[in-house]
Image (spheres, grey):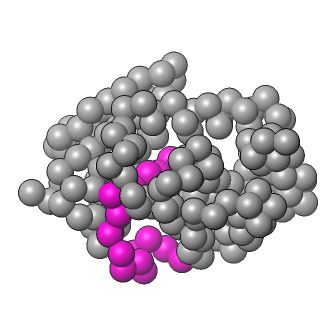
Amino acid sequence: MNQFKQFIELLMEYNQVHNITGLKSASDIKSNITDSLYPLKYLKLKDIKTALDVGTGAGFPGLLIAIQNPNIEYTLCEPMHKKSAFLRLCKVELDIKNITIETKRVEELNSTFDLITSRAVCNADKFLKITSNVTAKNTSILLYKGSNAKEELSNIKHTIHNNKNRNYVLIKNLKC
């Protein structure tokens, strides 16, 4: 069985007891896997060695990107213990070698990353502030945003790629 199918089964089973996501059906989870992987075509993946997902929750998008790209060392930052416990379960059950799970807030991390991803954590200005300690000159930031993405990013140089109701915001060269 492939890792994505295993992930769907694990999440559905774990979620029945621990309620870590509002996604209840396999088709909802599949749709969110597709959403997580969609913007990868806009990144130069060969240049990305390290990545951080802030507020990973039930694995979207960081865990799925890590499965799809085993050459990228991914840190999944999730401060809620029941969610990070699920991520640890996935790491073991799905035999994912390229992830590290940090049960803490992003402000507590000390490393910098080539790519930072996040979905539904906070507005863009606040996000850039709380991740300033893990951002280097060449860090790219990929934010999964809804319809208000343009308003959130009016003062920040960015590119938006759209798919249905999702805006994928790519920010580069923050620290020039």
Residue sitting nearer the eye, 55 or 43: 43
Q: Quadrant of residue 81?
A: bottom right
- Vertical placement of 3 versus 110: above or below? above
For this orientation, the residue located farthest to the top is 164
Q: Is residue 165 magenta?
A: no
- Vertical placement of 51 versus 120: above or below? below
Q: How many marks?
A: 0
- Classify residue 78 as left or right of residue 9: left
Residue sitting nearer the eye, 67 or 147: 67
Q: Quadrant of the N terminus?
A: top right
Q: Quadrant of the C terminus?
A: bottom left
Residue at the (37%, 52%) spot, across then down: 48
- Vertical placement of 81 versus 59: above or below? below
Q: Position of residue 139 (x, y in %)?
A: 27, 56
Range shown magenta: 104-122
Residue at the (84%, 52%) spot, across then down: 10
Q: Position of residue 92 (x, y in %)?
A: 77, 66
Q: Position of residue 103 (x, y in %)?
A: 59, 76
Residue at the (73%, 50%) spot, across then down: 21
Q: Is residue 113 magenta?
A: yes
Is residue 24 in view? no
Q: Position of residue 64 (x, y in %)?
A: 61, 47
- Vertical placement of 108 versus 135: above or below? below
Is residue 77 in view? yes
Residue sitting nearer the eye, 26 or 90: 90
For this orientation, the residue located farthest to the left is 176
Residue at the (76%, 56%) spot, across then down: 94
